[in-house]
Image (tube, rainbow, N blue to C red):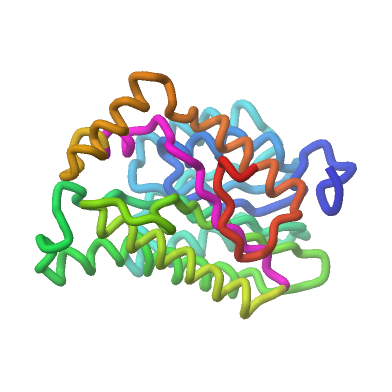
């Protein structure tokens, strides 16, 4: 390790870390791997809608990392109330002690109705509901947390957008998901351009073996896409979340990525 991480056994120092979508899949895996890389006295805020799964993860991480302040916060990020609860919790976890790093991982996302083709989306309400959770919430949560943790000497602020190949490539019957991921990538490129002191990364974790992937291979309206994903599952070609999570942590520790860049699992 070099830079800020050099010389610290914990890796990412005394940080306030926020992981959204932390109750399952990639978010849960990342939280488990991130916790031991934070220094004693650091804080980790786990956000998701599934209260029971968050409580279980919170207990697990507290037992494994007793010097880490861990809090699970059930919240609906598509609502103003949910967003404000996350910001308040992050402020509370910071406290008065010096903080070396703010790390926000915007992982929360949904697939949308992948049984529908482009021409099936005629309801503005359905589309707006999807975008509120998958795009609007990421913008508003990120901006609110950056204002709550303003630039100051010794504070490194890092924002991760969990992206996808779908941000770059169209998948038939995935209009909502591709649109959301592409919008988020550009949104965070704008942040990187406007705020050069903030480290911004869009990380595409690859085809993960998760509940979302199961939904994709069983409900996609495009039958060829279903067959492709089923073949990947049957031949062990889907990625374990821990392997991809570790690659993201390595990126954060080396800290040599271009701010605003889209980095895919297979690029590394």
Farthest residue to the bottom: give it.
194
Q: Is residue 122 left or right of residue 189?
A: left
Farthest residue to the top: give it.
235
Give the camera-side residue of 199 and 116. Answer: 116
Quadrant of residue 184 within the rendered picture: bottom left
- Span of residues in magenta: 197-216
Q: Position of residue 260 (x, y in %)?
A: 61, 65
Q: Is residue 110 left or right of residue 91?
A: left
* Residue 225 within the magenta-colored segment of the rendering: no
Q: Position of residue 159 (x, y in %)?
A: 60, 60
Above or below, comparing residue 222 to residue 78 in the picture: above
Q: Position of residue 157 (x, y in %)?
A: 68, 63
Farthest residue to the right: give it.
7
Q: Residue at x 44, y 71 (%)?
A: 140
Q: Residue at x 29, y 49 (%)?
A: 111
Q: Residue at x 41, y 39 (%)?
A: 23
Above or below, comparing residue 145 to residue 267 in the picture: below
**Number of labelled discs?**
0
Q: Position of residue 104 (x, y in %)?
A: 57, 57
Res 92 seen here: no
The quadrant of the image that shows the N terminus is top right
Q: Residue at x 26, y 59 (%)?
A: 176
């Amino acid at each position: 390790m070099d830079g800020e991480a050099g010389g610290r056994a914990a890796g990412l120092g005394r940080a306030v870390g926020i992981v959204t979508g932390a109750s399952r899949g990639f978010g849960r895996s990342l939280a488990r791997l991130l916790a031991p890389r934070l220094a004693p006295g650091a804080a980790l805020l786990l956000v998701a809608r599934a209260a029971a799964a968050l409580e279980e993860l919170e207990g697990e991480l507290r037992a494994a990392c007793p010097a880490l302040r861990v809090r699970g916060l059930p919240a609906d990020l598509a609502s103003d109330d949910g967003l404000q609860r996350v910001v308040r919790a992050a402020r509370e976890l910071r406290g008065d002690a010096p903080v070396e790093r703010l790390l926000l991982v915007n992982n929360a996302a949904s697939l949308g109705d992948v049984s529908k083709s482009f021409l099936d989306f005629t309801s503005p309400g359905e589309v707006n509901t999807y975008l509120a959770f998958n795009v609007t919430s990421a913008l508003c949560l990120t901006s609110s947390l950056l204002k709550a943790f303003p630039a100051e000497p010794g504070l490194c602020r890092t924002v991760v957008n969990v992206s996808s190949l779908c941000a770059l490539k169209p998948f038939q019957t995935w209009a909502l998901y591709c649109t959301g991921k592409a919008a988020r990538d550009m949104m965070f490129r704008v942040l990187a351009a406007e705020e050069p002191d903030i480290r911004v990364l869009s990380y595409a974790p690859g085809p993960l073996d998760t509940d979302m992937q199961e939904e994709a291979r069983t409900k996609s309206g495009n039958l060829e896409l279903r067959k492709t994903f089923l073949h990947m599952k049957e031949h062990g070609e889907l990625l374990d979340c821990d392997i991809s999570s570790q690659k993201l942590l390595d990126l954060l520790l080396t800290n040599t990525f271009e701010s605003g860049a889209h980095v895919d699992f297979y690029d590394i």
